[in-house]
Image: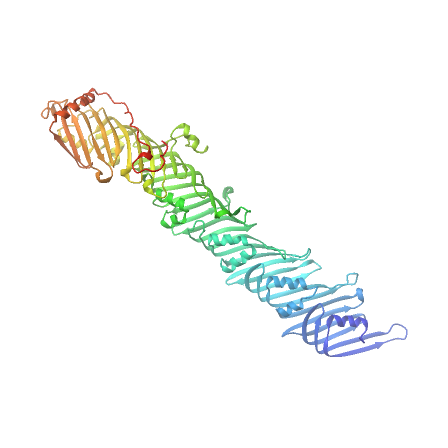
Amino acid sequence: RFMPAKMQELYAEVRPAGLFNLNLSLGHDGISKPEVSCEFKAIDCSAQFALMPYPVHGVQGDISKEGELYRVNLKGLAGQHPVSMEGYIIPDGIQTDSKLVIRSSGIPIDEQLLQALNTPKLEEARKTIESLGLTGNGDITAEFLRRPGIDDSYKIRTSIALRDGSVSFQEFPFPLTSLSGRMSYDPLKQDGFVFTGMEARHGDAIIRAEGVFDKTNEPGRLALQLELLNIPIDSDLRRATVIANPGLETIWTDYGLDGDVDVSRVEIGWIPGEKPLISLYGMQWKNGRLKPKALPFGWEDISGSLQWANNRLTIHSLHGFHDDTYLNIDGSTDGASAYIETEVNNELEWHVHFDSMQLTNLKATDEVRHALPESVRKVIEQIDVQGPMNLQLGLDLKGWRQQDLVTAEWSSLLDLNGNQLTTGLELNDVTGQIRILRGTWNGHEANADGYVELDSARILDIPLTTIRGPFHVEGNDILVGAPSPEAASRFLENNRYRDKKLTANVFGGRVGLQATVLMAPEDLDRLQYRVDVKLQDAELAEFAREKGVQEQRLSGKVNGEAVLTGMGISRTATIGEGWIHITPAQLFELPVFAQMFSLIQFREPSDTAFNWAYGDFEIRDGIIDFSTIELYGQSLNLGGRGWVGYAGPNESRLALDFYTQGKRKFLQPLTDRWVRIQVGGTVDNPQPVIQTRIPVLNDAFEGFMRAVDSGQMPSAPRKRQLPPLSQQPNAARQAVPR
C-alpha cells in the first residue's frame, strides 16, 4: 500500500512474493516534476500472473522503470519446467499500454494447468482442452497485450507446441497418442483457437489434423480437418463413431465391418451441447472384411473407395472375394450410384442402393443358400443351379422400423456357362443369359419379370440352341412363355418377348414352349407344372449326328406336339400326351427298325424306306405309351403300338408290337397276308421276334392295316382332355391355370 498507484497495478498483475532487492532513485532539478526510477530485482521469488495464475517459483530477474515504462525480465520454474516473462507495462488506468510474453517449456497439460486456465479470459481455452481430452506436454508462449483506449481488457495470444500428447475428443472418443502439433489463439486475427501441424497415432495408424475452434458466435464451433492413414476398423473406432452418430450403430451391427482404412479428408463440425457432424472423403478401405446381417455371406480382401456424409455411405467402388467368388460394386461409372443410408426418416431405418453390383464365379453352395432369406433360399434350392455363374445386379434394399421388415427391388443379368438347373425338368449344359427386368420382395413374397436368352441347353438330353422367351414370377407361380397373345399383359411393357412363347432351335428345326410351374417351397413333392411343346421341321439327320448314327440312313423332317403335366420332381410323375410325324422317314439306323429289318431279311431299297411315319402317345409312369404307330413306304408298311420306358423301373425298356403286310417278294416266304413282330429288350438292344398269327388279332388289325395301306397321312389327333393338376393323385393344391 506504500507503492505508487501505477506500481500497484503492476504488482496486481504479477503478484510477486519472496526475497527481492529494490533500488530507488529520485532526481529533481528544482523546476520540473521529480523523476523517480526504480529497479526490482528478484532473488528467490514466486509469482502468479493474474491473467493465468499458474504458480511459478524460483523467480529471478528484474523489473526496471524507464520513465513511465516498466520493463519486465523474469525467469523461474513452473514445477520443474523453466518459464520466463518479459515485456513492458506503461500503467495509466484505461490508457495502460502493456505487452508481456510468457514462455515455458515442457509444461504438462494436467489439472494444474486447467486450474490456471479457469479465468474469464481463458475459460474457453480450458473448455476446448477438456472437450478434446488433451494431455501431454507443451511449450507454451502466451502474449498478454493491452492497448490504450476505451477497451481496457487484455488480449491474450497463446501458442502451445504440443509433444508426447494424447487426445480423446468427448464427442468422438477415438484415442490418439504420440500427439504433436500447435494450438494457437490470436484474437487480433481471429476469435478462435487454431490447430496446425497436428499429428498423432492410434497403434500403427497415423492421423494428421488442422482446424479451428471459432468463438465468433457463442457457444463457438469446432471445425477439424483430418487425414487418416492405416486406421484399423476396430472396437475403438466403433465406439467413437457410434457416440458421434448413434445412427452408425446400424452400419456396425448389420454389416460386420473389419479391416483398415485411409481417409484423405475427415471433416468434424461440432457446436458445444450438440452432436458433432462427421464427414469422411476419399476413404480407401483396405484388407477389409464384410458380412451383412441381411445377407450373412462373408467377404474378404475387400478394397474400396468410399465417402461418408449426411448419414450416407457413398460407395464409389468396392471389390472383394469369397473364396473364388469376386464382388465388384461400381458407384461411379456412367452415372451409377451405390450408397448405404442410416436414420433415413421416421419409418425407414436404413436404405441400401446399388446400381451396379457384379458377382463373378458365384456358386450356389450351402453357405450361399443359408445366407439368403428363407423364402428365396427355398426357391433357389428347387431351381438347384449347379456350377459357377456370373451375376450383374441392380439392388435396392430398405429396412423398415416396423417389425424389422426388409423389402427389396432389383434387376439382374445372370450369365451361365455350362450350368445345370431344374425348372420342373432338369436342364443341363445351360449357357447364355437370364435377365430379370424387375424383381420385388415385400417381406413375404417375391415377384419377378424377365426373359431368357440362352445360347444352348440340354433338356431330356435334347440339345437346344438360341433359346428365347419371357418369364413371370408371382410368389410361387412361374409362367414361362406367353400362353396366348392376350396373356401378354402379365409381362412388363419393356419385356421384349412379352407376347412370345419360349422358342429354341433343335436339330435344325424350331420348338415352342409354354409352361406354368407352381413352386412348393415347403415340399418338393408338391411342385406342379404344365408344359405345352410344339416341334416344327426338326431334322432327323441332325439327331443322327448328335447320336453318332449315319445320317444318310436316318433322316426326315419331324413335327409334333406334346402336353406334359406333373407333380414333384420325379421323372415318373410326368403325365401327358402328344403326337409325332416324320416325312420322309429314313429310319434304317434306329436300333428297333434295324433289328426288325434284319429279322425279316429286308434289304434297304434305293428309295426312302417310308414316305411318312406317324405316332400318337401318352406319357405316364415313366413310359411313352404309343396307341398308334404308322409307317408308310413304297416297299413296306408298318402299323403298331406299345411303349418305351424313359424313367423309373422301365427306363430304356421296350414293349412294341408291329404288323406288316408284304408288298414285295422278300416277305412271301414268311406270310401270304401279314406278319406280327413283337419287340422287347431295351432301346440300345432291342429283341424282335416274329409271333404266331392270332386269329382274333388278325381281324382286329386287318382294318387298321387297310388304313395304313391306303397311304393317307393322318391329321393331328384329337387331344385327350388331361385332368387339371389338382385332380391328379395326391394333389391337394389349387390347379395351375391351363
Residue lying at 62% horizontally and 60% vertically, measured from the top left:
195
Residue 73, image x, y percentages: 72, 73
Q: Nearer the viewer, residue 441 or 4?
A: 441
Quarter holding residue 7:
bottom right
Q: Is residue 446 left or right of residue 29?
A: left
Q: Quadrant of the N terminus?
A: bottom right
Say above or below: 275 vs 130: above
Question: In this view, which residue lies farthest toward the top?
Answer: 710
Q: Is residue 485 left or right of residue 315?
A: left
Residue lying at 28% horizontally and 30% vertically, measured from the top left:
577
Say above or below: 265 vs 468: below
Q: Quadrant of the C terminus?
A: top left
Q: Is residue 7 left or right of residue 420?
A: right
Question: In this view, which residue lies farthest toward the right?
Answer: 31
Residue 102, image x, y percentages: 69, 69
Quarter holding residue 108:
bottom right
Q: Is residue 395 visible?
A: no
Q: Nearer the viewer, residue 161 or 297?
A: 297
Residue 353, image x, y percentages: 49, 45
Say above or below: 688 vs 198: above
Colour pattern of the rendering:
rainbow
Q: Nearer the viewer, residue 67 or 371?
A: 371
Q: Is residue 81 visible?
A: yes
Count of picture labels: 0
Residue 626, image x, y percentages: 23, 30
Q: Nearer the viewer, residue 627 or 6?
A: 627
